[in-house]
Amino acid sequence: MLERDVLVVGAGPAGLAASIEAAKAGADVLLVDLNMKPGGQLFKQIHKFFGSSAHRSGTRGFDIGKMLLDEAEKAGVEIWLQSTVIGAFPGNLIAIEKGIDGGEKEVITLKSKKVIIATGASENVVRFKGWTTPGVMGAGAAQTMINVNHVKPGNKIVMVGSGNVGLIVSYQLMQAGCDVVALIEAAPKIGGYAVHAAKIRRAGVPIYTKHTVVEAIPGEDGTVCKVVIAEVDDKFQPIPGTEKEIEADTVTIGAGLKPATDMVKLEKCRLTFNGPFGGFIPLHNDKMETSKKGVYVAGDATGVEEANTALEEGRIAGISAVESLGLIEPKEAEKMRIEIWKRLEALRMGPFGERRQIEKNNILAEYEEKVVAAVEMD
Amino acid sequence: MAEYFSDDMIVCRCEEVTVAEIKEAIRQGAKDVVGVKRRVRAGMGLCQGRTCEKMVQQILAQELGAKPWEVGTSSARPPIRPISFGDLANGVVE
Amino acid sequence: MALINTGYLEYEELSQIQKLPSDERYAKGPVAVIECVQEIPCNPCEAACRFGAIHIGDPITNLPTCSHDKCTGCGVCVSKCPGLAIFIVNKAYSENTATVAFPYEYMPTPEKGMEVTAVNRKGEEVCGAKVVNVMNPAAFDHTPVVTVEIPKEYADEVRSIKRL
């Protein structure tokens, strides 16, 4: 039976950071990811990151990805690509469908002392007439097409959603040579950073707040050729008579993300619902440990945020896992965690961050209330 | 404007389940995501509800006048990703 | 605030949030105009300035402030700002013209001497412009800083050019 100290699921910023911390402390770490390359969403991020110097801000996302991969390699992290966890069973057993050369797969059972779940998030969909028409896709999917596969999704894009994803991907679509003919936002305000909005306004992209897409109309070839938008009322319902037709061949939807919790559910970790963090998420404590002992979480799977917070949470999960293996002293681990939580607090400040700090505190408190109290009662 | 939100709109692409079918499942007694899934297979296809779950939750919340957390989320059991019979039949490498 | 509804600010609105260079400072030559108006966790501009002109401090969500007397208008911060929100304005370029330097990350990169169309914060065409400088060293990490010459009266308005 294959055995490892730590299994990390998902090789994005959280999973890589967790793997690095655990391997640096001397643990045998296996990192699995279903994609062909590690790095998660980092290699799609061709823009310079925000944050502090401690987070290598001002550096482009894919360069941060390269640095992390180097670090992981140096630390001795074993990485399986095109590999997926398909089951978790009693006795710390995990079934993994492992990608092997030539596109073949084999199913391997692994006994892992600790498991860190960093499965990220998936895109939300908005439902409108014709949303299943070819040419309608997630903003993240469009970003993968241009920045990873170097293929334009179309030439005339209507972007739905003015969060940072919608704004940044609009900018990158123009860098790739597409025209963004409209950005639609149902709320009365732009959701993402003003500086991101400002740079696409400078490039001439019209931003329609209080608007929604009501229909994507296919042309003769069956793909999108026109998009109908309309103004919405205070309850986000389209106002009849305000429809406007826009010529476009692609609709990209940046309507937020939801945490990917399949693996968390498989491990039967206790979930809680948190709207601002994107839906159902695993309860966890300040060590990033879930209600199931030895199972840790980090990154967007614990609530949708951004790469820097994912990295820091990953570090905490990695440190806590090796602490429980006895590879680092509890005192030392606690010291490291306090430092990281301080940096996380700095990232969760200001008008865009303070809500997430409040929600994070609520989650930690709920863990104390429901998980710790339940254990004490046993 | 109502024509834009007609009930024949597809919600679960993998299993081709419409709004009307989900509403019918709710009329038959489905109270949460799992209930809808069992009755009409929404979320049982290739993507395992990654695309449609949120929309199913919205329809449930709207029809039942429930809060988002009251309509639940789908359960997960192995295998959580589609896997070929061949790989399974080749047995488990230990 | 217009910004969160429309995505751009007029110069007057900007001046209520950020301390902008005085007329006296503008008269002395190139100076950084920081159009960063929200408290987001970000501070690379502070480390980028080797003259110590930009200050953020702790917490990193503070808005940057620029000591315009220390600023030489070198343009390094323009390339470092992840929000592409810093510009160098030189109202003393010539008797009738000014220059505006801005980050430009689209392909192709403009070349010195090119005649281009200057646009304002809304992307509207303002006037013709001439590219007088393109800085794109390795240290700028693929964020070229393009300087255009424009009639002086548009110096507070022009912030980019129409894509080539």
Image (cartoon, rainbow, N blue to C red):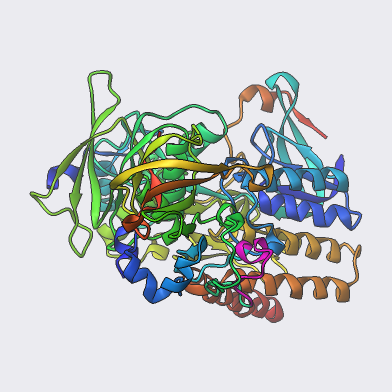
Q: Which residues are magenta?
A: C44-57
Q: How many labels sit on residues?
A: 0
Q: Residue B15: x and y, percent?
A: 39, 33
Judge left or right: residue A348 versus residue A189: right
> Is C59 contained in the magenta span?
no
| Residue at figure coordinates x 74%, y 27% from the top left | B91
Quadrant of the rendered structure where residue A228 is?
A: top left
Say which of A177 and A142 sits in front: A177
Quadrant of the rendered structure where residue A194 is?
A: bottom left
Say which of A87 and A73 sits in front: A73
| Residue at figure coordinates x 12%, y 50% from the top left | A242
| Residue at figure coordinates x 37%, y 76% from the top left | C16
Quadrant that contains the N terminus of chain A: top right
Judge left or right: residue A374 versus residue C120: right
Q: Residue A182: x and y, percent?
A: 29, 44
Judge left or right: residue A52 versus residue C81: right
Residue furthest left in the image: A241
Judge left or right: residue A145 versus residue A375: left
Quadrant that contains the C terminus of chain A: bottom right
| Residue at figure coordinates x 45%, y 67% from the top left | C27
